[in-house]
Image (cartoon, rainbow, N blue to C red):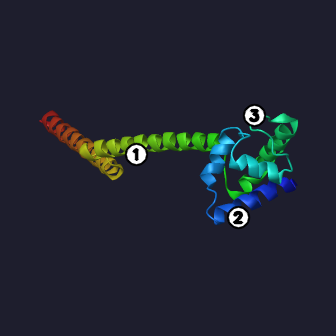
Amino acid sequence: MDHHFFKFWGELLLQTADGQRQLKELSRWIQSGFSPSGELAALFRKCYGLPPLAPHNTGDDWQKATADFHKALKAYAPLMGWVPLERYDRLRREKERLEAEIAEQTRLIQQLEAILDDKDMGHMSLVTRFQNLVTDQSKAFDDLMQALKASSEISEDTDSL
């Protein structure tokens, strides 16, 4: 556990509550690679027990302190619900891609449903058409049988004469 990390955050949050600091300022400072100059750098030096050096003098102690801070930030940020900007951007792009894919699939489903409705080819319509086809074929077969029966009766009558 990095007590300097907690001390820095405690001081920063107290100053933020007093209206002296903004979290956007902290975000810019972290994204700039922990610039050794500025008010946040001074607060950082104070919390990490570093001497107040000239802004251009970063030294090994500064490098180690910023590395420790970055390591602690990576460990504790997820506990506060924060995600790295790269991960956020990757997830946002994936979400947008999936939304576009869903919209395309929804559009395609609607088109196919419209085609089925236009051609009266819905599920129940197909079942009804199939039943009508079977009925028509049965009737045609019965008519054929009746015609054959009638023709065979006629031929029996003519043979008996």
**Going by the image, does 33 lie left or right of 47?**
left
The residue under label 1 is: 106
Q: Is residue 123 above or below residue 62?
A: below
**Going by the image, does 105 lie left or right of 41?**
left
Closer to the chain start, of discs 2 and 1, is 2
The residue under label 3 is: 56
**Going by the image, does 1 lie left or right of 133?**
right
Q: Residue at x 84, y 50 (%)?
A: 48
Closer to the chain start, of discs 3 and 1, is 3
The local crowd at label 3, few if under 14, some if 14 to 19, many if 20 or more residues have their Cα within 10 Å, is few
Viewer-side residue, 42 vs 63? 42
State the image coordinates of residue 129 (x, y, percent, origin top left). Answer: 29, 47
Where disc 2 sits, the SS reads helix
Please identify the quarter of the rendering in which residue 15 is found: bottom right
| Distance CA(mark 3)–CA(mark 2) | 28 Å
Viewer-side residue, 58 vs 74? 58
Checking the image for residue 14, the label placed there is 2
Which amino acid lies under the numbered mark 2 shown in the image of this protein?
Leu
Q: Is residue 1 above or below residue 150?
A: below
Mark nearer the viewer, 3 or 2: 3
Q: Residue at x 74, y 57 (%)?
A: 79
The C terminus lies in which quarter of the figure? top left
Mark nearer the viewer, 2 or 1: 2
